[in-house]
Amino acid sequence: MAKLEKTTIYESTNPAKETLLDKTARIAKEIKDGDKEQREIKTERLRNARLENIAVIPDEPITAAASRSRKRR
């Protein structure tokens, strides 16, 4: 008789089938992870644009020309 190891005694030959709940949870997680990745990319892009905009704007505020007041009819 062949000597069996503990790992071969309890090892399942067929993997458990994915239930409908498992499938739904897996798909929901994939969608959520995809949205998170897109959100992080957008946040990084906006952050870089803001930092670039701050670097371009001079420290002294630009004074606007005095505007005429509107006449009411």
Image (spheres, rainbow, N blue to C red):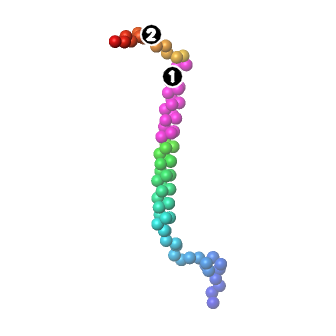
Residue on which the image places disc 2:
66
Q: Residue at x 59, y 76 (%)?
A: 11
Is disc 2 surrounded by few (<14), some (14 to 19) or many (20+) residues within 10 Å?
few
Asked if residue 37 is positioned above or below residue 51 in the image, the reply reads below
Give the mark nearer the N terminus: 1 vs 2.
1
C-alpha distance separating marks 1 and 2? 22 Å
* Percent x, y of residue 50: 51, 31
* Percent x, y of residue 32: 49, 52
Looking at the image, the residue that sits furthest to the left is: 73
Q: What are the residue bounds of the magenta stretch?
A: 42-59
Say which amino acid is labelled 1.
Ile
Q: Main secondary structure of the magenta part?
A: helix
Task: Indicate yes or no whether the magenta region holds residue 57.
Answer: yes
Verify CB contact (< 8 Å) between mark 1 and mark 2: no
Asked if residue 30 is positioned above or below residue 51 in the image, the reply reads below
Q: Residue at x 52, y 17 (%)?
A: 61
Q: Residue at x 47, y 48 (%)?
A: 35
**Quarter the C terminus occupies:** top left
Is disc 1 surrounded by few (<14), some (14 to 19) or many (20+) residues within 10 Å?
few
Asked if residue 67 is positioned above or below residue 32 in the image, the reply reads above
Residue on which the image places disc 1:
57
> Which labelled disc corresponds to residue 34?
none
